[in-house]
Amino acid sequence: MSGRAQVDIPARICRPYILALLLAALINGALRIQIAIHYWRRAYYAGFGFDLIRNSLALVFSLLLIAFLVRLISLVPRLWWTRQPIASGELFWLGLISTLQLTLNLVSVNVTIYRLKIASYELLAESIALYSAINLIFLFWYWYADYPLRGRQAIGTGRAGVPLGILFPEEEREKFFMNTETWIPKPIDYFYFTILSSNCFGSPEGHCVIGSRLKLIQIVHTVFMIFVFIIIVARAINTLA
């Protein structure tokens, strides 16, 4: 995802999506603490090997969280004071670190389900946390991949000359009724697209993704949601008293 040319994005445009990543990091941190509480309450011990793997995952998560906060703090002056543009490469690393945190938590929750037999309402709460974090992170990725393609100096086209990006219904209606192409999606538009993509396991009706980069993002998004809905939520519902 970082292979494209660097694009400078105005700070005011970046703010909502960086805040989404920060909120996802806080949710992931709280979930990591909850996982540790599960093991502490049950005084669980499975031998040196498993405990080493579990503690290593927790350590890697902590290091990723520190790296995320350090990078985020370095952007704060530009986001709120100097308001200098932010390079897309800097944003990419924030998104990547957040996605790795999410992946570690997804793996850890599934291992915890198997080892500690976590069930019912506890598991439902954790699935809601994962669902929220996934949507916040992929809200960022959809915007990150789509927004630069809308600038006049960074317009992308496919092999057949088809413009790349997310196609929103508003764009088609504007072109049909007004014969113009000036509409730009706002955070609520990307958020709507992300939420419905989570629930539909694909692009919602009236929307579509064009280009291999966005299709790859949606595939990964769908895989994450399959883990949450089919494995975690399904077990939670099956074990409700």
Image: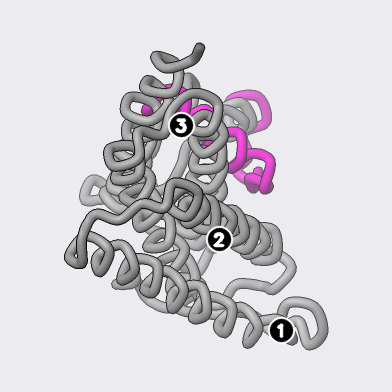
Quarter of the rendering occupied by the N terminus: bottom left
Query: Which residue does the numbered mark 3 point to in the structure image?
Result: 198
Query: Which residue does the numbered mark 2 point to in the structure image?
Result: 29
| Foreground label between 1 and 2 | 2
Q: Residue at x 43, y 25 (%)?
A: 233
In the shown orientation, is residue 19 left or right of residue 103? right
Query: For residue 119, what is the image quadrant?
Result: top left
Q: How many C-alpha atoms fall within 10 Å of the one at disc 1: few (<14), some, or many (≥20)? A: some
Give the structural element (helix, strand or loop) at label 2. helix
Name above or below for residue 240 compared with residue 30. Answer: above
Mark 3 is on which residue type? Ser
Whether label 3 touches label 1, CB < 8 Å = no
Q: Nearer the viewer, residue 166 or 195?
A: 195
Residue 180 colored magenta? yes
Does label 3 or label 2 sit earlier along the sequence? 2
Q: Residue 23 placed where, x, y %? A: 64, 57
Q: Nearer the viewer, residue 172 or 214?
A: 214
Magenta: main secondary structure equals helix
Mark 1 is on which residue type? Arg
- Residues at marks 1 and 2, CA–CA distance in whole angstroms: 25 Å
Q: Residue at x 37, y 27 (%)?
A: 201
Q: Which mark is residue 17?
A: none
Q: Residue 20 placed where, x, y %? A: 63, 56
Q: Which residue lies most toward the right here? A: 81
Q: Residue 53 placed where, x, y %? A: 24, 65
| Residue 161 seen by the camera | no
The magenta stretch is 176-203
Name above or below for residue 204 compared with residue 53. Answer: above
Whether label 3 touches label 2, CB < 8 Å = no
| Foreground label between 3 and 1 | 3
Query: Which residue does the numbered mark 1 point to in the structure image?
Result: 78
